[in-house]
């Protein structure tokens, strides 16, 4: 008999082994081993094939898992799950802590009533936050958007484009309506002709939309298809059908459309926030190029010859905290060009170690009449009485977005305000400049349009901080955040941007110690307590400057009067839309750009065109 294959041989060998085992003790074992080994050519091959298949199957499953994961991670990021677009609010005071990705963070503060839904965001050079008082009634769509997404809604409203591809959108709408009616019409035996017409039109429109994304891609004769579909839908509407089925379908379509619109809103808001919090590539290039050029250049002694001027109290000293080369340069250039005399002006630019050398070289390459510029690295300041951790991080002026809701009537109307206050580093000014008695502090997002020398002649009557006040925000409206401390509820919030500071009076009252005591109360982050610390440290010690000295809002308010802008001594671009960003408000950019020195070769090489 011919063998039938490996399985037959293996079976025969097994029978042979069993027969031999009846009369021989050890022989069956030897025969079994031999027989099994002989059959291993087949059995072993089967096992090998099975193992190989399992390996390939595991590899395929692993690859598919990685592919699916790589698709889900970007989707989750765009949906806002990364760091959370909708963050819970566990803190009774309303502060929502978020993971710090840079020197900026986000604060959400609610004055009373229920905490509403929050949206985390940050900006390029400020620490942003929201203070909101919520109440009864409802907020209209635009105000609710602004409360939820901040200045993104202002930007979107100003840059809203006219609807494009109207025919494609009309085809999609017709397709939705036809699909809603088709199941109910198909159940009616008397409407076979209409059912076929609807099915044919639905198939044609689906085919067209699968091949066309814009009106330009639509095939010739599309108008006739639209008319046929419209006629079929009109007939379907005239046929008595079960309204519950149609209503259910329309509600499904509505929910799907709302979900899609909400997704695109979140996606757009996220990309907007990403744009305003990220340094433009051109400015990053400029900073890096300046740093490289600094170390390539021969040793340059830039400040030794003017060291005496840095500590001369008889001169006019200006202090700027900044990590932005262009922004600080515009502040200094505008102040010098608008001054009657520049020889008595001394500017102190405080920056971090990353931007220190770029700043040094930039202010060495560019002169500002007879003014003197000193660049200080905060990480190298020798202040033994303070925590070194504060000097490691560059804290810029803290900015809050305040939403004031009017709850007097049946409806709620919100009004957005931006207030900015000093950062932790500002409270080291008396020790950084121990020989000075008075300084003017300028934010790096301001532009000076008039001579500021008159500020030095103001008698502040024992006050410490000369600032423009924002009386649209009172301390009483922030009572839940300021705590149970003693303060005048009718006092106005003051603004950073332009501040004249009496350092001698500051030292006399030891306000730095007062600030440290206030910020040590509670367990909030350093950024969160900055609002309470700054507003209460200078309680009854703020000298109110005339509003003509500074005009705020150029970084978020599209409705400022141009004449008021021209009359202001200082323009403050507080808000997200800074003038050096592409998202800056175009009609206000010209007031900033005219003080930018665009002749430097590195600007063109780095494609810096704000």
Image: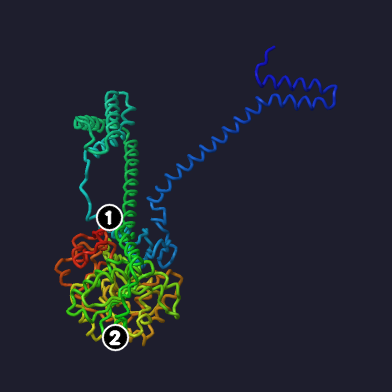
**Closer to us: 351 or 220:** 351
Q: Residue at x 23, y 65 (%)?
A: 554
Mark nearer the N terminus (1 vs 2)? 1
In the image, which disc is placed on residue 350? none
| Position of the C terminus by quadrant | bottom left
**Closer to us: 44 or 252:** 44
User: From where the camera sits, is residue 548 visible?
Assistant: yes
Q: Position of residue 35 (x, y in %)?
A: 73, 24
Q: Is residue 388 left or right of residue 374?
A: right
Q: Residues within 10 Å of mark 1 (few under 14, many from 20)?
A: few
**Quarter of the view holding residue 468:** bottom left
Kindly report the distance in space between the C-alpha atoms of the residues bearing marks 1 and 2: 54 Å
Q: Report the residue that reaches farthest toward the top.
A: 1
Q: Position of residue 240 (x, y in %)?
A: 28, 31
**Closer to us: 39 or 187:** 39
| Position of the N terminus by quadrant | top right
Would you place residue 428 above or below residue 182 in this image?
below
Q: Secondary structure at mark 2?
A: loop
Would you place residue 452 above or below residue 191 in this image?
below
**Quarter of the view holding residue 535:** bottom left
- Which residue, given by chain and number where applicable, does mark 1 sit on? 141
Would you place residue 427 above or below residue 187 in this image?
below
Q: Residues within 10 Å of mark 2 (few under 14, many from 20)?
A: some
Q: Residue at x 31, y 47 (%)?
A: 261
- Which residue, given by chain and number where applicable, does mark 2 sit on? 313
């Amino acid at each position: 008999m011919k063998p039938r294959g490996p399985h037959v041989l293996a079976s025969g060998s097994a029978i042979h082994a069993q027969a031999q085992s009846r009369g021989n003790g050890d022989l069956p074992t030897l025969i079994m081993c031999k027989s099994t080994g002989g059959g291993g050519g087949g059995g072993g091959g089967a096992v090998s094939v099975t193992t190989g298949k399992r390996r390939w199957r595991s590899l395929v499953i692993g690859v598919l898992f990685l592919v699916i994961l790589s698709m889900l991670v970007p989707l989750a990021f765009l949906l806002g799950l990364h760091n959370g677009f909708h963050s819970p609010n566990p803190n009774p005071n309303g502060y929502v802590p978020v993971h710090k990705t840079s020197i900026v963070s986000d604060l959400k503060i609610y004055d009373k009533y229920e905490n509403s839904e929050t949206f985390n965001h940050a900006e390029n050079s400020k620490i942003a936050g929201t203070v909101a008082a919520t109440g009864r009634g409802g907020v209209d769509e635009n105000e609710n958007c602004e409360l939820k997404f901040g200045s993104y809604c202002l930007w979107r409203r100003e840059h809203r484009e006219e609807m494009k591809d109207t025919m494609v959108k009309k085809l999609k709408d017709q397709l939705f309506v036809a699909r809603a009616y088709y199941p109910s019409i198909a159940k009616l035996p008397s409407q076979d002709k209409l059912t076929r017409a609807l099915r044919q039109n639905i198939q044609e429109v689906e085919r067209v939309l699968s091949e066309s994304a814009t009106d330009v891609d639509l095939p010739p004769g599309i108008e006739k298809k639209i008319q046929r579909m419209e006629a079929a839908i009109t007939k379907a509407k005239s046929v008595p059908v079960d309204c519950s089925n149609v209503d259910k379908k329309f509600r499904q379509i509505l929910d799907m459309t709302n979900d899609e619109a909400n997704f695109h809103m979140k996606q757009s808001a996220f990309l907007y926030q990403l744009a305003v919090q990220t340094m433009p590539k051109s400015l990053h290039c400029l900073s890096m190029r300046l740093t490289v050029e600094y170390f390539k250049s021969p040793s340059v002694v830039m400040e030794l010859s003017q060291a005496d001027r840095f500590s001369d109290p008889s001169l006019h000293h200006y202090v700027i905290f900044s990590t932005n080369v262009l922004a600080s340069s515009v502040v200094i250039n505008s102040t010098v060009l608008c001054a009657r005399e520049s020889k008595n002006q001394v500017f102190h630019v405080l920056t971090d170690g990353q931007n220190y050398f770029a700043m040094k070289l930039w202010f060495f390459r560019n002169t500002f009449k007879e003014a003197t510029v000193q660049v200080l690295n905060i990480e190298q300041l020798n202040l033994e009485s303070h925590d070194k951790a504060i000097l490691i991080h560059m804290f810029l002026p803290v900015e809050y977005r305040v939403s004031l809701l009017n709850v007097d009537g049946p409806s709620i109307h919100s009004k957005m305000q931006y207030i900015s206050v000093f950062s932790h580093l500002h409270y080291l000014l008396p020790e950084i400049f121990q020989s000075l008695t008075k300084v003017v502090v300028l934010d790096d997002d301001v532009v000076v349009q008039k001579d500021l020398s008159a500020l030095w002649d103001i008698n502040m009557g024992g006050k410490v901080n000369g600032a423009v006040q924002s009386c649209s925000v009172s301390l009483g409206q922030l009572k839940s955040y300021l705590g149970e401390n003693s303060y005048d509820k009718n006092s106005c919030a003051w603004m950073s941007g332009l501040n004249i500071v009496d350092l001698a009076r500051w030292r006399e009252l030891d306000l730095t110690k007062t600030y440290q005591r206030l910020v040590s109360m509670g367990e909030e982050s350093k950024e969160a307590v900055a609002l309470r610390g700054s507003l209460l440290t200078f309680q009854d010690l703020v000298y109110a400057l005339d509003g003509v000295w500074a005009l705020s809002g150029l970084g978020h308010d599209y409705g400022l009067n141009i004449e008021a802008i021209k009359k202001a001594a200082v323009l403050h671009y507080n808000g997200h839309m800074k003038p050096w960003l592409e998202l800056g408000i175009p009609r206000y950019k010209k007031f900033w750009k005219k003080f930018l020195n665009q002749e430097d070769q590195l600007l063109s090489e780095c494609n810096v065109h704000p």
